[in-house]
Image: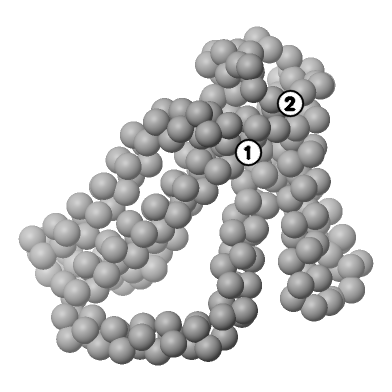
Amino acid sequence: MLKMIKQELISSYRQFILIDAIFLAGCILTPWIPQSFIQSLLLLGVSSIGVGLVIILFYNMVRRYQRSLFSKQGYLTLTLPISEGKLIAAKLISAFIWYSLSMLFIVLGLSILMYYMDPKAFRDIFPDLLRVFQFGLAHLNDFLYFWIVQTVTFVELLLSFYAVITLVHTHWFKRYRLALGTVIYCLMLIGYGYLFELVPAGSDLFNLSIMILSCLCLFGATWYLLKKHVELE
């Protein structure tokens, strides 16, 4: 599976590096942009830039799954001597690696932008970061739990898209796959909402267990559909 992960990273690095490089270049070139334009841009909110970039990155991850498995390239991918489970896992791991690297690019870019806007305020952040780090060490379990939840949430969201994309590319769906996939995903979100209302609120560990169980179900559903019901074109 390591070879598959390596292949995924090599075949997808251009689009992710390009997006991150454009964002970082925009942050670095900020001082040469007219001040009036910068002020207008800031009215939109600096945070919206990072959110927009995350949306673009996530779209590329989902789009790449669809193209690598269900386009002309998909025939070659699905006939490789590797199990469907390892194939899905390789795509998940490579997507998580790119997501993590992109988050570092976003933090770096926004830090550069903040430094250009107000160097003094930027320097004042470091004592706050030190206090946050010390707090994290003092509450290590809570700190680790937070990052585990973030990782599981990312995996769960990505797997939900994988499952729906795989479903609409089975022999049951021949036409209007995008529209039907959108409807199915919305219905799945509604179903999730009702399901979580029925499940009584529990401890943090219980809630995390529910999320992990959801990931396993989505992974299993994607594996089953990919193995049993996807027709190669």
> In the rendered structure, which amino acid carries the disc numbered 1?
Ala
Mark 2 closeness class: few <14, some 14–19, many ≥20 residues within 10 Å? many
Classify 231 as above or below 106. above
Quarter of the image that includes the N terminus: top right
Mark 1: secondary structure: helix
Residue 130 appears in which quarter of the rendering? bottom left
Picture residue at 61% right of the left edge, 80% below the top? 142
Classify 223 as above or below 102. above
Quarter of the image that includes the C terminus: top right
Q: Label 1 vs label 2: CA separation?
A: 13 Å
Picture residue at 24% right of the left edge, 73% below the top? 114
Rendered location of residue 194, percent (x, y) = 86, 61
Marked residue nearer the N-terminal end (1 or 2): 1
* Res 47 seen here: yes
Picture residue at 33% right of the left edge, 68% below the top? 46
Mark 2: secondary structure: helix
Mark 1 closeness class: few <14, some 14–19, many ≥20 residues within 10 Å? some
Please indicate whether residue 12 sits to the left or right of residue 114 in the image: right
Q: Which mark is residue 60?
A: none
Please indicate whether residue 105 sits to the left or right of residue 136 in the image: left
Please name the residue that numbered disc 1 is placed on: 89
Residue 33 appears in which quarter of the rendering? bottom left
Residue 72 appears in which quarter of the rendering? top right
Rendered location of residue 49, percent (x, y) = 36, 60
Give the residue at the far top of this rendering. 233
> In the rendered structure, which amino acid carries the disc numbered 2?
Leu
Rendered location of residue 121, percent (x, y) = 23, 85
Please indicate whether residue 231 sits to the left or right of residue 144 in the image: right
Picture residue at 37% right of the left edge, 36% below the top? 13
Closest to the observer: 217 or 46? 217
Please name the residue that numbered disc 2 is placed on: 226
Classify 137 as above or below 13. below
